[in-house]
Image: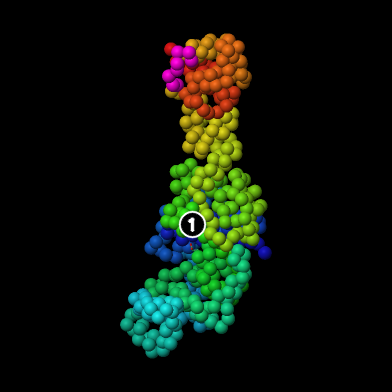
């Protein structure tokens, strides 16, 4: 059996970190099993689905490296849904209902007022053919409900949650098609999962009750249900579902200079028994992916943890990973020197300017100016080499008697404008002998 997973966003908005996590886990599981990862756009809602969001979803997944092997759109499949609906009608598994939204709302309020769960009372099942004809002659159109089989419990073994057991009598018969002919999520999703040969449905635990309903739909459609893995939801550091997480997506990550590898490394591991580690190579993360390691407690998403992980990831990135985003003149040596000083890729330009100049040196005391004048002379006598810093400080130590901080700090400040930064051994050759002479000349002028 070829494993096939799907990520099924509705293009009615941008992906947020919770969706991204679901996409990632579907992708990782498919890759681990040598299977296929499908992007299914759940765009049955013509009004709210936007092409811009479709493009944004594709771009976000591409940026994260979650490339879909196949793409499908529900809006291209309405004929298929209608065919299946016709069969379900013939089998008596769906029924028309004419209640207005207001009437349904009232029913729910009454039930809740009596302390009962707001389950649809199936009044439409009692409509006589005459009553239905009368509604239709008034020009009223029905919505359609799927008739749950109340006779046996719905049972499945969830790959994360274990044994699940639902009493169908405690669920409402779901509306599948609206009065205006538009599809609700429930049935098209089950039809697609069957026809697209999805073997594993991986999604948030907010879908558990939908799964119970959909298992009956799979069976009514003559198919064996896929495997299900419902993951605990993502929460913020304050321990609850936050609005903030709902608006955190790829564009905010990019703005904050978070690398895709950092997001992948974090979202691959939070909520699991494996530690969050700075792993750049997704293959390594895929190798450890296992639903058995997912916990039942919510996964905690900590933006500060992401920032710290991102820094560690940046320090592991190879020149080839980043070269397109570096200043033109910056080569692999430049990257190697700058990299350990970066908090994120947004710091590159600032450090590269330390190499290329101009820099703004501080004011020096008369003693330091004298010392730097000697440094200028010594440097003039030296040849450009990879040992330039050692040679310069060695010569200065001998002639001035300075050592430690009084020896190194004025030089670092005069040559870089800063009192911290890359190792001067590797930085000085990068700045170069001539440019260094210029910088020293300016400070002593
Ligand atoms: N479009 C649905 C959603 O975004 C898909 C749920 C599913 O994975 O079946 O919630």
Residue drawn at point x = 38 percent, y = 87 percent = 131
Q: Which residue is mark 1?
A: 239
Q: In x, y percent, where is residue 340?
A: 56, 34
Residues in magenta, as a range: 361-368
Q: Quadrant of the N terminus?
A: bottom right
Q: Is residue 151 above or below residue 345?
A: below
User: Can see residue 359?
Assistant: yes
Horizontal placement of 138 versus 54: left or right?
left
Horizontal placement of 159 versus 120: left or right?
right
Q: In x, y percent, where is residue 104?
A: 38, 77
Q: Quadrant of the C terminus?
A: top left
Q: Does the beta carbon at disc 1 come under 8 Å from ligand 1?
A: no
Q: In x, y percent, where is residue 434?
A: 52, 16
Looking at the image, which is closer to me, 445 or 385?
445
The residue at the far left in this view is 138
Q: Is residue 20 above or below residue 377?
A: below
Residue drawn at point x = 51 percent, y = 57 percent = 234
Mark 1 secondary-structure assignment: loop
Q: Is residue 345 above or below residue 164?
A: above
**Membership of 364 in magenta stretch:** yes
């Amino acid at each position: 059996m070829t494993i096939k997973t799907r990520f099924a966003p509705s293009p009615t908005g941008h992906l947020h970190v919770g969706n991204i996590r679901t996409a990632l886990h579907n992708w990782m599981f498919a890759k681990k099993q040598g299977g296929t990862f499908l992007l299914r756009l759940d765009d049955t809602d013509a009004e709210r689905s936007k092409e811009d969001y479709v493009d944004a979803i594709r771009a976000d997944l591409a940026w994260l490296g979650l490339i879909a092997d196949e793409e499908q759109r529900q809006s291209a499949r309405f004929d298929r849904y209608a065919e299946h609906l016709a069969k379900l009608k013939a089998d008596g598994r769906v029924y028309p209902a004419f209640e207005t939204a207001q009437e349904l709302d009232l029913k729910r309020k009454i039930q809740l007022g009596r302390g009962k769960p707001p389950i649809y009372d199936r009044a439409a099942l009692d409509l006589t053919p005459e009553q239905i004809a009368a509604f239709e002659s008034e020009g009223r159109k029905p919505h359609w409900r799927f008739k749950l089989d109340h006779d046996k419990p719905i049972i499945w073994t969830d790959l994360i949650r274990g044994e699940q057991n639902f009493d169908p009598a405690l669920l409402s018969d779901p509306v599948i098609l609206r009065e205006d002919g538009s599809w609700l999520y429930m049935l098209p999703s089950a039809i697609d999962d069957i026809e697209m040969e999805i073997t594993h449905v991986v999604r948030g635990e907010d879908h558990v009750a939908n799964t119970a309903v959909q298992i009956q739909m799979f069976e009514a459609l003559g198919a064996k249900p896929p495997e299900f893995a419902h993951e605990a939801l993502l929460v913020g550091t304050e321990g609850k579902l936050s609005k903030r997480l709902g608006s955190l997506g790829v564009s905010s990550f990019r703005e904050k200079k978070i690398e895709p590898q950092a997001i992948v490394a974090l979202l691959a591991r939070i909520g699991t028994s494996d530690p969050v580690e700075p792993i750049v190579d997704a293959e390594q993360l895929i190798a450890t992916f296992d639903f058995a390691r997912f916990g039942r407690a919510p996964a905690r998403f900590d933006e500060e943890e992401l920032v710290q992980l991102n820094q560690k990831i940046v320090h592991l990135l190879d020149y080839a990973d980043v070269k397109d985003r570096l200043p033109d003149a910056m080569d692999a040596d430049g990257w190697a020197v700058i990299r350990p000083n970066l908090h994120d890729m947004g710091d590159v330009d600032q450090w590269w300017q330390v190499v290329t100049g101009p820099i703004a040196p501080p004011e020096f005391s008369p003693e330091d100016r004298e010392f730097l004048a000697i440094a200028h002379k010594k440097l003039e006598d030296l040849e450009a080499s990879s040992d330039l810093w050692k040679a310069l400080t060695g010569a200065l130590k001998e002639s001035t008697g300075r050592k430690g901080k009084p020896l190194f700090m004025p030089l670092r400040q005069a040559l870089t404008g800063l009192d911290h930064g890359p190792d001067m051994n590797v930085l000085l050759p990068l700045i170069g002998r001539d440019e260094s002479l210029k910088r020293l000349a300016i400070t002593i002028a």
